[in-house]
Image (cartoon, rainbow, N blue to C red):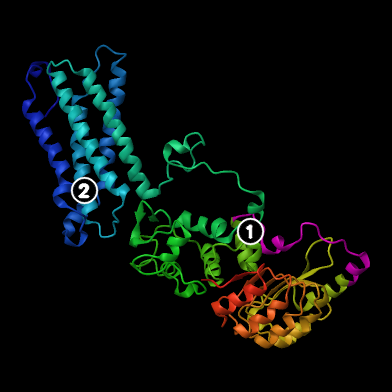
Amino acid sequence: MSDSTPATKSRKPIFLTLLGIATCAGMLSMPVIAGPPNGEAMPDMMRFLGRFHPVILHLPIGILTLALLMEFGSLFTRNAASTRGIMFFAAATSVIAVIAGFLLFQSDLEADVTDRSIRHLWGGIAFSCVTILAYIVKSWTDAGASAAWFYRFLLICSAGVMGFASHDGASMVHGADYLSKYAPPALKPLLGGKVEEPKDPAAVADPLVYESIVAPMMEEKCWKCHNVEKIKGKFRMDSYELLLKGGADGAGFVAGDASKSNIVIRCELPIDDDERMPPDEKPGLTEEQLTVIKWWINAGASNTVKLSEANAPAEVAAIIAKQAPVVKTTAAAETPAVAPAANDKQRDDLKAAVTTVQKTFPGAVQFESQASTGLTFTAVSMRGKFNDDDTAKLGPVIPSLVSADFSASLITDKSLVLLSSASGLRTLRLSETPITDAGLDTIAKMASLESLNIYGTQITDAGLQKLSALPQLKRLYVWRSKVTPAGVEELKKKLPQCVIEMGI
């Protein structure tokens, strides 16, 4: 199978032809004889040899590319060198790459058989077979046969099959959009990508939390191994429904409890733990991304809630604003498009009150806009340290509050009575506080209330029905409370315009 010389030019490569055809037949029969992959039945040595496939496969690709360039150059040169020797090495290394790839396909315990992986296997075999045939035809051509045109045709076909198989291989490793992601719009459809349609400005300004914030984080770090083409652990993450469905180890997340959610648990394992995701020290979700995802899960993991309705704490809002600066943060999203004009004297009086309160709670009280007398308050930085006595210290600013966040604080029903003078209050967050059904008697009198969060409280169905007196209520969050689906359905009959999020 050495290169031809003038002295041996007339020798017919019959043995070489038979050997090449037998090699092709052997490769084509391997998947049929072996059957479906069974990694547990394969010796470690076979698994070890299969891991060399990603290294070896580049050899026939490079060698075949050299043969193509030489053949193209021969069209412009009379005494061009023969590419027979080069094609021998292209054919030989392609066979080795196919065998290594077949061992990897059959023996890798982590491999998940998909249509693309099967197509990649057969594509690699087809590439090797066409390359072998091209080498055989080249050998007959150098021996005197008039088949140069057929050799070049097979060479081009081999390159085409190589491109097809290589694209499948790259997609399996790097994701289906690896080649198309940054391609020009005109080329994206040809490469299997999608041309994104212009987004609705309203959706950009106030996006869905899952679709625009959480999913892109997972797409960046998780989808490469958990998609329709590569399903590690029988777990796909490229859609909300499949993420919830989970894989071999159960559901991907537990709505309302990030500490019991697989996607969080696996990411926070030590880097040397075999169960850690992603494995092998590959870059995973950052601490900031995990913070956002844990907040989203703890808040109920809804795929329909908008950012302005999600009650993101200051820490999470800051991360979101940094990673997706185009979208509004919660505070910005809640600001009216046109703020009501404020009486200068009212604002001046309020400024004095705000300054007084800020001495006790720095940065906790702000005007909702430069042209409004409405105030916003958040106790998120104080959390478990903020109690009823602290609420009393807000007295001078309470009547002007339009938004108040007491999440994870120690306030009780007593604080709700103090808030009763906030006649313009639109947003109230009481998640994970000790409030009870009795406190909802006060809330039921807040006629301007549009959004209420009682996630993680002791509120029951009896207390929930008191909220039917709120004509403006549009969003209600009741995850991990004592509210039942039956209670929610009963309230929906009375407040059909209200979206009630249960996290299920």
* Residue 459 shows in this picture: no
Q: In the image, is 270 to the left or to the right of 456? A: left
Q: Nearer the viewer, residue 43 or 471?
A: 471
Does residue 495 show up magenta in the picture?
no
Question: CA separation, marks 1 and 2?
Answer: 47 Å
Stretch of the chain drawn in magenta: 324-349
| Image location of residue 10, percent across then percent down | 8, 16
For mark 2, give the secondary structure: helix
Task: State the residue at coordinates (59%, 56%).
Answer: 323
- The amino acid on which the numbered mark 1 sits, given as a three-letter code, is Ala
Q: Mark 2 points at which residue?
A: 102
Q: Quadrant of residue 382?
A: bottom right
The numbered disc on residue 47 is none
Q: Nearer the viewer, residue 384 or 184?
A: 184
Q: Earlier in the sequence, mark 1 or mark 2?
A: 2
Q: In the image, is 235 to the left or to the right of 469? A: left
| Image location of residue 479, percent across then percent down | 56, 75
For mark 1, give the secondary structure: helix
* Residue 485 shows in this picture: yes
| Image location of residue 454, percent across then percent down | 63, 78
Q: Nearer the viewer, residue 228 or 442?
A: 442
Does residue 342 show up magenta in the picture?
yes
The numbered disc on residue 321 is 1
The quadrant the N terminus occupies is: top left
Q: Residue lying furthest front in this view?
A: 493
Q: Nearer the viewer, residue 2 or 200?
A: 200
Task: State the residue at coordinates (32%, 13%).
Answer: 76
